[in-house]
Amino acid sequence: MQKKPIMKPFVRQLILIFLIIFTVSTVFAAFSRTLEKEEEIALTQLVQDVQNGKVKQMTITGNMVEVVYHDDTKATTLKEAEVALSQSLLNYGVTPQEISGVTITQKGEGNTLAWVTTVMLILFPILILVFFFFFMFRQAKNSMGQAFDFGKARARLFGADQTDKNRVSFKDVAGLREAKEEVQEVVDFLKNPKKYLQMGARIPRGVLLVGSPGTGKTLLARAVANEAGVPFFSASGSEFIEMFVGVGSSRVRDLFSTAKKAGRSIVFIDELDAIGRQRGSGYGGGHDEREQTLNQILVEMDGFERTDATIVIAATNRPDVLDPALLRPGRFDRRIMLDLPDVNDREAILTIHGEGKPLSADVNIREIAERTPGFSGADLANLMNEAAILAARRNKQQVSQAEMLEAIDKVLLGPERKSHILSIKEKKVTAYHEAGHALVASSLPNADPVRKVSIISRGMAGGYTLKLPSEDRYLRTKAEFLDELSMLMGGYCAEKIVFKDTSTGASNDLQKVASIARRLVCEYGMSEKLGPVAFRGKDSLVPWQASFESRDYSEKTAAEIDQEISRFVKHAQKQAEKILRQKSKTLEKIADVLIEKEVLEREEFEQLVGKKTTKTQ
């Protein structure tokens, strides 16, 4: 059995340094006192100096006499014991008149101040040097600690001992009913692992949460950890990667080792695609840091024993780029899809985020949910926050429906650009452009209803026409795409008909038209001429592979694709022009109201176009 050292090397070195400094300071102080030592004279010499009038002052301390001459030089001497100095001087022949010309003072023998001063002169430099070396050793120790911690995981720990404000339960996760059902058995396994092990069942090693940004992947993972009452180690995929090869794999080993020591626990890796991209793509080489980190994750997940109660939950919005080895059984056994919330889920999410906010009586959460299709949970949380900020900025005590509706536009398009003042001509062009969009949309049977038309600049848009579906849709037909193309061409056609010219305001619309038309032909197989065939173009390839791979169709087919795309665009243009020419008076009416009011809500717009107003349920 080895004996423990009496003291740590660091403490021994500190004591040695202290002794060296103390010795040097003592020698220095003694040497300084030697250099500054005053001249010693005999008592007879003092008598002669007093008789010659050279002495200005004498200070008596015990038997020691300190003499100060008129030229400010100093000297010391010893007087006779038990005899006053003046008496000794008289005995040596000094007259009283000569003594009266000298100032004589008496001091006590114990000069404490002198001793304190001497001690301070010795200790003060010692303390300064000790503090300096202590600070240097401390910095060196921290630097060494950081060097050794470089390969440790930087995961954040959320445990069951967190405060209430940090706890997340399934009640805080609105919607995601199927996803919550899938992870319920993960919670049950973490609570009662023996029940599954007795049946010979093996809980999934990994659960992969797949969904669009903001759909609640991280929130759901934290809810699982809280419901199970186990530690939750959270880390982002990018936190493992460093410029030094081997650091990422070291951090992975440390993370899984820490999780195993904690017993039943959850390891959550956000943005898994940052380190889990497919290997062998030729990007970054075959032995780069990212691939070594991925290999270590694969090894660690294979190393779990059947009785291990550590579950890995990962989140990504790019499952298509993940390495197949990650998705095989035994690693990420389950893939749970998190969809964007439907109208009922959006209402529940808005209700949760509305808690703690003073909402006025006119706030209709259902209407806001119906006007926000395509919004994720994060978008809805941002919407409620923006509404509260708008109400506070206007010095209101409650958040009203007006702030909620304005917050929708702000989240979709950005804040109002009130400083962007249009000239009279530009304002007229913008009004006819947006009126053309709105009028064509309201005239087509398969287009979404127009909710709002505005010529107030928001974000990059000079004006906008907000059209939203009346219900959530997961499939779209060819007729709906064609009507959307015509609606997008409505602004371009309105400018061309009214002003006999076009402006740059239609550039974004034309980009959307080209994109939709290309998808109709190449992805959805909705071209009558080319038939139900999907064509892969270069724009769908991985960037670094685009220069190495070619299209999977001939040049002749490429020309036919371009012709079909052009045919879809021209058909949409003709349909939009036809509608606008037939309803030119209505177009002018809408534009005039927009120039005057700048904003048209759904009810007023439908009155202008002669449609029966549909109330929001």
Image: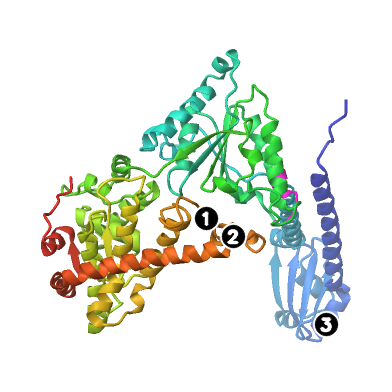
Q: Nearer the viewer, residue 386 or 490?
A: 490
What is the number of the mark on residue 551? 2
What amino acid is at disc 1? Answer: Phe
User: Which badge, 1 or 2, is on the more N-terminal residue?
Assistant: 1
Residue topped by disc 3: 49
Quarter of image, res 220: top left
User: Which badge, 1 or 3, is on the more N-terminal residue?
Assistant: 3
Tag 3 secondary structure? helix
Please rate how many residues cluster around mark 2, counting C-alpha atoms within 10 Å: few if below 14, some from 14 to 19, many from 20. some
Rounded to the nearest whole Å, what is the CA distance between mark 1 and mark 3? 121 Å
Q: Do the residues labelled 1 and 2 touch (CB within 8 Å)?
A: yes
- Provide residue 38's location: percent of width, then percent of height: 83, 73
Nearest-to-viewer mark from 1 and 3: 1
With 192 as the anchor, is 580 left or right in this view? left
Rounded to the nearest whole Å, what is the CA distance between mark 1 and mark 2? 8 Å
User: Which badge, 2 or 3, is on the more N-terminal residue?
Assistant: 3
The boundaries of the magenta stretch are 243-251
